[in-house]
Amino acid sequence: DIQMTQSPSSLSASVGDRVTITCRASQSISSYLNWYQQKVGKAPKLLIYAASSLQSGVPSRFSGSGSGTDFTLTISSLQPEDFATYYCQQTYSTLTFGQGTKLEIK
Amino acid sequence: QVQLQESGPGLVKPSDTLSLTCTVSGGSLSSYYWSWIRQPPGKGLEWLGYIYYSGSTSYNPSLRSRVTISEDTSKNQFSLRLNSVTAADTAVYYCARAHSSGRIFDIWGQGTMVTVSS
């Protein structure tokens, strides 16, 4: 299986900050990479698919980039509702997820 | 809009079979892939498998020998069976709709907690 490693595992930030989360694949996955947001007690929500395509209805402050093995999710200006755990998911082969990045309020 | 709802027992005994159903409302099973994903308490997400509306299936190789996903188009439902469960199968189980060959999960159920314990 392709291993997905996210960094950092946790992150403290303030409202209005610009935040970047990184996801690294154990082998090249082209652009087969999605990002999800999960709030406590809720199901994950699709944010970004195919590395950089914004899912319908998702605010434009979310963006994704990267290809090959290294990918980033950027939130341009953190809002109170953005504090959650974020997961990357590779879809190049047997679907696997990263371990998650917990974004907390500073 | 399309909504998914999981249902099934919240407690299963070790070595028994875990059975869950996902009911799809606001749309049909046609033209999409229907998946099961689980999340052990405090841990990350694991894809279990999917069924395409035509009936074809794909499973995570790590669980393939124990997992079966089926559908009932007349009831707009699809189901998960996981055999020979152990405590390691304790998790929140989500059903989800997927597109792009089953790779992108765009609609999720709320999830149901299943505990494996005697």
Image (cartoon, grey):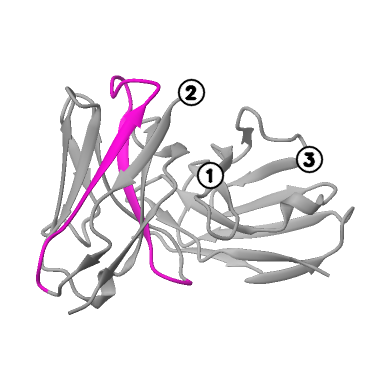
Q: Residues within 10 Å of mark 2 (few under 14, many from 20)?
A: few
**Circles 1 and 2 on the same subunit:** no
Q: How crowded is mark 3: few (under 14 residues within 10 Å), some or many (20 or more)?
A: few
Mark 3 vs mark 1: which is more N-terminal? 1
Q: Which of B110 and A104 is in front in this view?
A: B110
Q: Which of marks 1 and 2 is in front?
A: 2
Tag on residue B70? Answer: none
Q: Residue at x 43, y 63 (%)?
A: A3
**Vertical placement of A82 versus B13: above or below?**
above
Q: Which residue is drawn at 30% across and 70% down?
A: B90
Q: Mark 2 lies on which chain?
A: B
| Relative to B68, B102 lies left or right | right
Q: How crowded is mark 1: few (under 14 residues within 10 Å), some or many (20 or more)?
A: many
x and y, in percent, of residue A74 in the image: 74, 49
Q: Mark 1 lies on which chain?
A: A
Q: Which amino acid does label 2 sit on?
A: Gln
The CA distance from mark 3 to mark 1 is 16 Å
Q: Mark 3 points at which residue?
A: A61
The CA distance from mark 1 to mark 2 is 22 Å
| Relative to A54, B99 lies left or right | left
Q: What residue type is labelled 3?
A: Arg
Magenta stretch: give its range.
B15-42
x and y, in percent, of residue B9 in the image: 23, 58
Label 2: state its secondary structure.
Answer: loop
Q: Which of marks 3 and 1 is in front?
A: 3
Q: Mark 1 points at which residue?
A: A34
x and y, in percent, of residue B101 in the image: 34, 32
**Vertical placement of B66 versus A93: above or below?**
below
| Relative to A62, B59 lies left or right | left
Q: Mark 2 points at which residue?
A: B1
Q: Residue at x 40, y 51 (%)?
A: B111
